[in-house]
Image (spheres, rainbow, N blue to C red):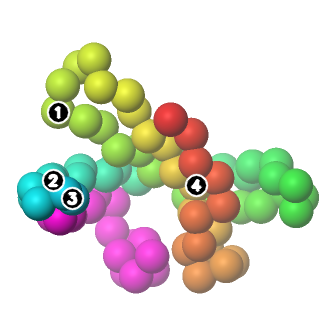
Amino acid sequence: MSDLADEKDTFNYRIADGGKIKQYFITKISQETITTPLGKIEAIKLTRERNRPKDRKTTLWCAPSLNYLPVMLEH
């Protein structure tokens, strides 16, 4: 959330998971209006690509008006 507030476009995080260190590469895609149960919200669209082509892709939308709180997630 703080990296989005700093207007970065790419993010690289090292995350500890089950005794292993994983690399998370996240890219800012666009800004768009999405429809949620709370109504329409302006959000920044991000995607996390995994290393292997067969792995799933995660897309995340974060709302600047809510301090970049994630408001939608899609696998």
Q: In percent of the image, x 64 and y 68: which residue is there?
A: 63
Q: Which residue is mark 3?
A: 17
Q: Which residue is mark 1?
A: 51
Evaluate if marks 2 and 1 touch, with contact meaning CB atoms under 8 Å apart. Answer: yes
Q: Could you say which disc has been placed on residue 28 in the image?
A: none
Say which of 18 and 35 sits in front: 18
Q: Earlier in the sequence, mark 4 or mark 1?
A: 1
Q: Earlier in the sequence, mark 2 or mark 3?
A: 3
The magenta stretch is 1-16
Q: Which residue is mark 4?
A: 61
Dot 2, crowdedness within 10 Å: few (<14), some or many (≥20)?
Answer: few
Evaluate if marks 3 and 1 touch, with contact meaning CB atoms under 8 Å apart. Answer: no
**Disc 2/disc 4 C-alpha distance (Å):** 20 Å
Asked whether residue 29 is in view, the answer is no
**Disc 3/disc 1 C-alpha distance (Å):** 16 Å
Dot in front, 3 or 4? 3
Dot in front, 2 or 4? 2
**Disc 4/disc 1 C-alpha distance (Å):** 21 Å
Q: In percent of the image, x 33 and y 68: which residue is there?
A: 8
Dot in front, 3 or 1? 3
User: Percent x, y for residue 15?
Assistant: 20, 63
Q: Which residue is mark 2?
A: 23
Q: As shown in the figure, which amino acid type bears the numbered disc 2? A: Gln
